[in-house]
Amino acid sequence: MKIKKTWLISFSPTGTSRSVVNALVSGLRGIPFENIDLTSPGMVPARQFDPDELVIIGVPVYAGRVAPLAVKRLGILRGNNTPAVIVVTYGNRAFEDALIELRDIALQAAFRPIAACTFIGEHSFSGPETPIAAGRPDSGDLATAEAFGMKISEKLAALDDPETAHCPEVPGNSPYKKGMGPLPFAPVLLESACTQCAACLPVCPTSAISLGTTIEVDHTLCIFCCACIKVCPEDALIIDADPIKQIRQWLFEHCTERKEPELYL
Ligand SMILES: Cc1cc2nc3c(=O)[nH]c(=O)nc-3n(C[C@H](O)[C@H](O)[C@H](O)COP(=O)(O)O)c2cc1C
């Protein structure tokens, strides 16, 4: 079947899921594509996709599930038997039930998952002293994603109708493991280091950061994605909450063995 357009749909506070989705589409040579970025809090209009379009959906894993805000924001998109490639990116610990959950979300929204994959992205809690999957996805990961994109275009070319497409089995349990609820803390500002450049404001997916007399982070809105920490040129936003510091240390000590992308076609 001929695909008239590919839509790259991502929720990606620290950019790793978006990199993978971009690499996948570069393997689908010759098909025009457009981005739908669900990361920023601005309104993305609800829309339905056609059967001769392709969507590539990329989201991060939070606590072994699809990041809850990604689930919510994906809710405005619907397919019409539209082929879909589903991608979860995780920080080298585990993706657990996130891929099967994303498959179910896609199916419930009338998409037809024809390919699925998991990739590793630098962990949101990674830092210079406690690197966790630092630099991932790297050039090898992106080459794997591009090659998988080529395989997907071959699968699409051999298809007459998305309804007849094989929907690959993916790992994970149903019912899913318990996901994460709201966290009672947020990154903390080192006022002496902050220059109030405000680089952290636009990257926050929930508009939890504001600039008054100083930078303020509203912990009731914060999802602890760490986008603000990673973008700050002065390292003025830090992880200070003990439970997150303990998780970061545990990840640094236990998640060092390199995991590799998994591809399902
Ligand atoms: C709150 C939170 C929970 C996370 N849970 C997991 C997890 O269960 N397993 C894992 O390997 N990585 C986990 N991560 C790491 C992210 O999945 C990883 O950094 C991902 O690459 C981020 O995607 P993004 O760059 O598209 O935002 C978590 C990150 C955050 C912020």
Image (cartoon, rainbow, N blue to C red):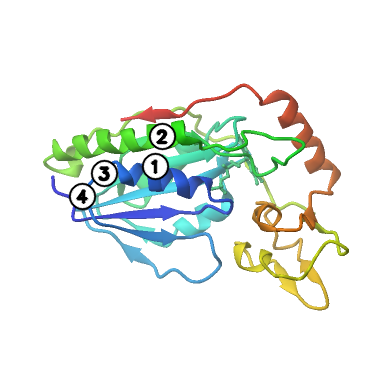
Name the residue that disc number 3 marks: 28
Residue 243 image offset from top left, x and y in percent: 82, 41
Q: Which mark is residue 44?
A: none
Q: Of helix, strand and loop, which one carries label 3?
A: loop
Query: What amino acid is at disc 2?
Result: Cys
Front label number (2 vs 3): 3
Inter-mark Cα distance, 1 to 4: 20 Å
Front label number (2 vs 4): 4
Front label number (3 vs 1): 3
Inter-mark Cα distance, 3 to 1: 15 Å
Mark toward the start of the polypeptide (2 vs 3) = 3
Inter-mark Cα distance, 2 to 3: 15 Å
Tag 1–tag 2 contact (CB < 8 Å) = yes
Relative placement, left or right, of 173 versus 84 is: right
Q: Of helix, strand and loop, which one carries label 4?
A: loop
User: Is the CB–ligand 1 distance for label 1 below 8 Å?
Assistant: no
Residue 209 image offset from top left, x and y in percent: 71, 67
Using the image as rendered, state which of residue 159 and residue 231 is in the foreground: 231
> Seen from this angle, which residue lies furthest bottom?
212
Relative placement, left or right, of 80 versus 238 is: left
Q: Where 35 sits versus 164, above or below?
A: below
Using the image as rendered, state which of residue 189 and residue 46 is in the foreground: 189
Mark toward the start of the polypeptide (1 vs 2) = 1
**Image quarter in which the N terminus is found:** top left
Tag 4–tag 3 contact (CB < 8 Å) = yes
Name the residue that disc number 4 marks: 30
Q: Of helix, strand and loop, which one carries label 1?
A: strand
